């Protein structure tokens, strides 16, 4: 395993899709260069990399598909970047037990394509599916668009293998559940590279459903759409996909069917047995109609499914130093959601050029909201200042209502100012103790989750 110190290669390894980093000067980029990069092809080589970093007093940053949007892979001190792209491939397909095991560097989309050929699906479809490594999806606590049926990544993972800072290998028993004390694998789900390097993942899989149906439903208000989604749970007719768009973002989908509307849009998707899906769809439409829901037919829903991996807005919204675009995903209980929609919308009215907003992941007790912001500034510095002001408005507003300022993108570096408030002092103290126990030298992604070794603080 070679240590790569070429400057051009190092520059490739300091960014993900974090909009703030897209505005950096050459000097700022150079300030974040790692000391070197390694491309391990085995777990043993990862252990060697950890040992090397320890001996040379380097931090370790794990680099997967670099599809994150919060700067979680940006080095903040002399570091060794461990690029996982060579540690990839399917290790085992266990059809009898509905499981697949893959190396952590395998892209989620590659696992999905492999499973589809065998008549199965991972059931986890984040927008970054074909960009993100499976290890990265676990480390950032990812959510997929069909989460109402299949759950989020923490519900799909059954077993993990992790190289710890001391070089030991953690692996949990590969079984669906065990009442044997606190569930240790959960420490690594959402850990963002602070506790170890995930090397293998075993995931639950499903047969590809017999049929699927998508629909668009128009509503008079955000409240009508949100509380219709809540009613789906009360009636036990929850679709696999429930998405609720504010009128501004809904235009992207209305235009695909040449439909003129300034109302709220819900997209629903149902998958399952041919004998079940039509009946559930019928009940969903009946339920929606009771709260101003108007069925727009299948085409608009099918168009959403066709384009669901398209995130061109993120690239186009950041294609100059005077433009910035980002998605800030938050969550709350049902009664909090309308307040969040309106409070954030009102406070950002004169701060952004355009605000899209949608719910995309629902639960028995509530849902998430994406606030997608577009803004412009006079120059890079002014644009970044506006960007940070917008973030503060959104996060403060969500916390004011009682919600969470992070749903599934993780914390990275952009959310660090609000992390301690989010988790509270007792939880943060526990996290520090766990970090100190796992990583006493503070080597692994230092600063992420505001975790640093006490000796260095």
Image (cartoon, helix red, strand yellow):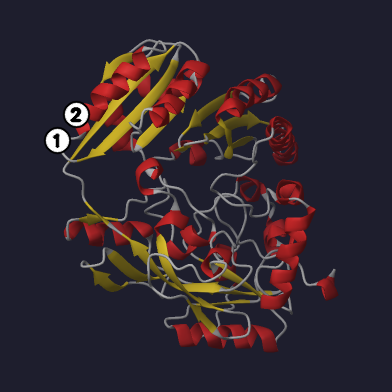
Label total for image: 2
Callout 1 secondary element: loop
Callout 2 secondary element: helix
Residue in the image at 21% along x and 27% along y? 279
State the image coordinates of residue 119 (x, y, percent, origin top left): 17, 56
Find out whether the residues at labels 2 and 1 contact each other: C-beta distance under 8 Å. Answer: yes
Residue 275: numbered disc: 1
Whether residue 94 is visible to the viewer of this picture, yes or no, is yes
Q: Nearer the viewer, residue 197 or 13?
A: 197
Examine the image and state in which quarter residue 429 appears.
bottom right
Residue in the image at 50% along x and 21% along y? 246
Residue in the image at 45% along x and 35% along y? 360
Examine the rendered structure and indicate whether residue 151 appears above or below residue 332. Answer: below
State the image coordinates of residue 370 (x, y, percent, origin top left): 54, 34
Examine the rendered structure and indicate whether residue 413 appears above or below residue 236. Answer: below
Instruction: Measure the alpha-carbon separation of dots 2 and 1.
Output: 7 Å
Residue ID for mark 2: 278
Examine the rendered structure and indicate whether residue 288 appears above or below residue 127. Answer: above
Q: Residues within 10 Å of mark 1 (few under 14, many from 20)?
A: few
């Amino acid at each position: 395993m070679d240590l790569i110190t070429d400057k051009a290669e190092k520059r490739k390894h300091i960014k993900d899709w974090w909009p703030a980093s897209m505005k950096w000067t050459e000097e700022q980029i150079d300030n974040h260069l790692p000391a070197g990069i390694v491309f391990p092809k085995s777990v043993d080589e990862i252990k060697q990399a950890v040992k090397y970093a320890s001996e040379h007093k380097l931090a370790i940053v794990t680099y997967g598909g670099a599809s994150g949007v919060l700067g979680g892979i940006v080095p903040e001190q002399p570091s060794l970047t461990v690029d996982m792209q060579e540690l990839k491939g399917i290790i085992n397909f266990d059809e009898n037990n509905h499981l697949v095991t893959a190396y952590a560097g395998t892209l989620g989309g590659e696992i999905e394509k492999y499973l589809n050929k065998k008549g199965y699906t991972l059931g986890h479809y984040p927008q970054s599916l074909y960009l993100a490594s499976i290890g990265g999806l676990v480390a950032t606590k990812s959510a997929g668009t069909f989460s109402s049926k299949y759950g989020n990544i923490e519900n799909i993972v059954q077993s993990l293998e992790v190289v710890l800072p001391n070089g030991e290998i953690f692996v949990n028993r590969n079984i669906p559940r065990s009442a044997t004390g606190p569930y240790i694998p959960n420490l690594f789900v959402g850990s963002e590279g602070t506790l170890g390097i995930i090397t293998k993942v075993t995931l639950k899989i499903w047969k590809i459903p017999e049929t699927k149906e998508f629909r668009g439903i128009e509503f008079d208000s955000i409240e009508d759409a949100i509380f219709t989604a809540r009613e789906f749970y009360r009636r036990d007719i929850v679709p696999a996909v429930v998405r609720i768009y504010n009128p501004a973002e809904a235009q992207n989908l209305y235009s695909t069917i040449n439909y003129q509307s300034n109302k709220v849009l819900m997209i629903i998707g149902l998958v399952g047995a041919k004998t079940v899906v039509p009946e559930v769809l019928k009940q969903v439409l009946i339920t929606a109609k009771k709260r101003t829901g108007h069925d727009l037919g299948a085409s608009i829903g099918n168009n959403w499914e066709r384009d669901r991996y398209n995130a061109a807005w993120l690239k186009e919204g950041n294609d100059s130093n005077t433009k910035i675009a980002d998605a800030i995903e938050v969550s709350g209980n049902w009664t909090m959601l309308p307040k969040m929609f309106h409070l954030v919308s009102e406070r950002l009215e004169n701060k952004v050029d355009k605000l899209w907003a949608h719910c995309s992941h629902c639960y028995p007790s509530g849902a998430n909201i994406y606030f997608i912001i577009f803004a412009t500034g006079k120059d890079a510095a002014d644009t970044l200042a506006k960007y940070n002001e917008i973030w503060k408005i959104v996060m403060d507003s969500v916390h004011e209502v009682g919600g969470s300022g992070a749903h599934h993108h993780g914390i990275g570096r952009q959310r660090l100012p609000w992390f301690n408030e989010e988790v509270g002092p007792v939880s943060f103290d526990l996290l520090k103790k766990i970090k100190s126990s796992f990583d006493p030298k503070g080597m692994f992604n230092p600063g992420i989750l505001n975790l640093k070794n006490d000796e260095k603080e």
